[in-house]
Amino acid sequence: MKLDLNNPWSGRVAVESVCRNTAQPRVHFDVPLLEKLGRSMKRKQQAPCPVIPYKDPHRPAVEWMLVDGERRWRAAKAVGLKTLWVCFEPGVTDENIHESSLAANFNREGHTKMDTARALQKEIDAGRTVDELADVVGKSNTWVTMHLSLMKLHSELQVMMDPPTPKDRRISLTVAGALSAYPKEKQMVLFAKHCAGRKEGAALAVLRTSAGAARSSTRDTDAQYAFGRIKSAFQTVRELNVLGDKILNKLSPEKAAEALVMLEQIRADVVPLKVKLEEVIG
């Protein structure tokens, strides 16, 4: 078939003539859900899969590469469909296919945190800025930066962010972001202490209750207060970063200047706190 690369096109092609995009950010796919989608596609495919013309010298049957829609392609293969509805849009090329796939995919569910981190890092390595990536994926700079920080994690911790690690054992984005600020050799020690501390805290609470203790020790109370205040401050700053322009632009110039002074003071006050906490960790 002769394709006019200057005009959009849509039609059905052989499933075997389509190959996956190796730069596709998504890696993990739920097989039962693919089969369910495939059965639905037997009745009607709701949307075409964007593709670009592609030749593979090792696979003569391949004529197209997916830009988006790998779930639909995999679902079609899972239930034995022979054809797939695809579409072509001028402007997508081998050079910008990863960016196009990134833009198409990251407002959808199903992408793991490390899928996201690796895809964003690939764009950073190609010369993109955080600001540009935020525009491409329709997220905040904070969201992009937080996911990029996962690339600094120890490889064993990265594995614990995604399947096949069970949900109850996966590391939260908040904990992962905090760990990523430390050298990799120290991250494992800190994570072990984090896990031990969490379990110990629960055990102490059960012990006090079962023993009928009327009150906690002063040390326990003070420690809970200190940790609670730090956690509260962290959550407040995180929420403000996520909300960003939606509320900060409503401040008057005078209030914005006052807030900036307070933030600078907070930055200065955090340094001695960080030193003290590192001494506690050892």
Image (tube, rainbow, N blue to C red):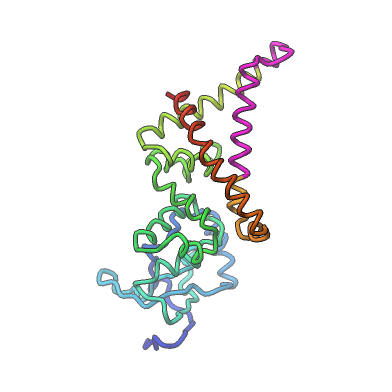
Q: Is residue 174 left or right of residue 13?
A: right
Does the magenta run of residues contain 222?
Answer: yes
x, y percent for residue 27:
43, 55
Q: Write down the region rendered in magenta.
A: 207-236
Q: Residue at x 42, y 67 (%)?
A: 99
Is residue 267 at least partly visible in the picture?
yes
Q: Is residue 195 above or below residue 66?
A: above
Which residue is more in the foreground, 268 or 218?
268
State the image coordinates of residue 181 (x, y, percent, origin top left).
43, 40
Total numbered circles? 0
Q: Quadrant of residue 15?
A: bottom left
Q: Quadrant of residue 77?
A: bottom left
Q: Is residue 254 above or below residue 161?
A: below
> Is 46 situated above or below 124?
below
- Return the x and y of residue 221 as percentages of the image width and height: 65, 21
193 drawn magenta? no
Q: Main secondary structure of the magenta part?
A: helix
| Left or right of 92, for residue 174 | right
Query: Which quadrant is home to the C terminus?
Result: top left
211, above or below 18, in the image: above
Give the left or right position of residue 97, taking residue 251 as reference.
left
What is the x, y in percent for residue 63? 35, 76
Is residue 31 among what the camera can see? Answer: no
Quadrant that contains the N terminus: bottom left
For the residue pair 45 and 191, the one nearer the viewer reads as 191
